[in-house]
Image (cartoon, grey):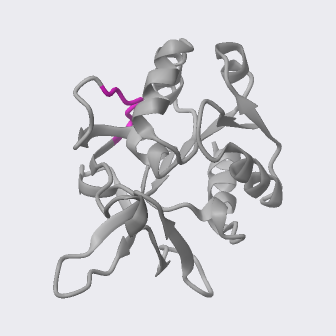
Amino acid sequence: MIGVLALQGDVREHLVALAEADALARPVRRVEELAEVDALVIPGGESTTMSNLALAFGLMEPLRERVAAGMPVYGSCAGMIMLAEKILDGRDDQQSVGGIDMTVRRNAFGRQNESFESAIDFKGFEGEPVHGVFIRAPWVESVGAGVEVLAELPAADGAESRIVAVRQGNLLATSFHPELTGDHRVHAYFVRMVEAR
């Protein structure tokens, strides 16, 4: 059973994508519901709001405990920020669940009106590139030695490429929103992680 953190963001789309990837999925809003799932998706949305709601609902510490105990978690966009050990351009009071040894920059690709889509070569995926939807998306500034980089967005105009997908143990994160595309390979990859766990 895979939960989708249902405090804020694109919860329904992740539930559909997980079902399409042959997983049982349910929304998670309370501590008791978190205790009943084997894994969790933290969706895209607004990371500061999500952080504040997790604190208000008493979920932040239980989330940190489950991550530390090895629960598989996938975070997309705001979910990536929630899994980061360090956040750049966040609010001073913003907290994260942590777990992935990475530094992420909020809204790194620009504001809402600068959202875009791009083909992403995802490590280990055969066939067409993944269709990446970037909406006020973060990017990964740096990763620790234990983090595997799964995808980078090629840079335009001679700038350096940007890390947009990573994995560390049972934790997976993407800057982009695969749940919005109809391509469920990232969710299937996560389901395989959960099954292996």
Query: What is the count of numbered marks?
Result: 0
The part of the chain drawn in magenta is 94-100
Residue 26, how many percent across, how many down?
Answer: 78, 36
Q: Quadrant of the C terminus?
A: top right
Q: Tell me which secondary structure the magenta stretch mostly adopts.
A: loop
Residue 12, how many percent across, how many down?
Answer: 74, 47
Residue at 28%, 58% (x, y): give it.
108
Q: Is residue 168 magenta?
A: no
For this view, does 155 lie left or right of residue 81? left
Q: Is residue 97 magenta?
A: yes
For this view, does 68 lie left or right of residue 21? left
Residue at 47%, 16% (x, y): give it.
55
Q: Nearer the viewer, residue 1 or 195?
A: 1
Residue at 57%, 45% (x, y): give it.
43
Q: Quadrant of the N terminus?
A: top right
Residue 182, how many percent across, how many down?
Answer: 72, 70
For this view, does 21 lie left or right of residue 177? right
Q: Nearer the viewer, residue 138 or 174?
A: 138
Residue 102, how many percent across, how many down?
Answer: 28, 47
For this view, does 158 lie left or right of residue 52? left
**Relative to 87, residue 167 above or below:** below
Which residue reaches farthest front? 113
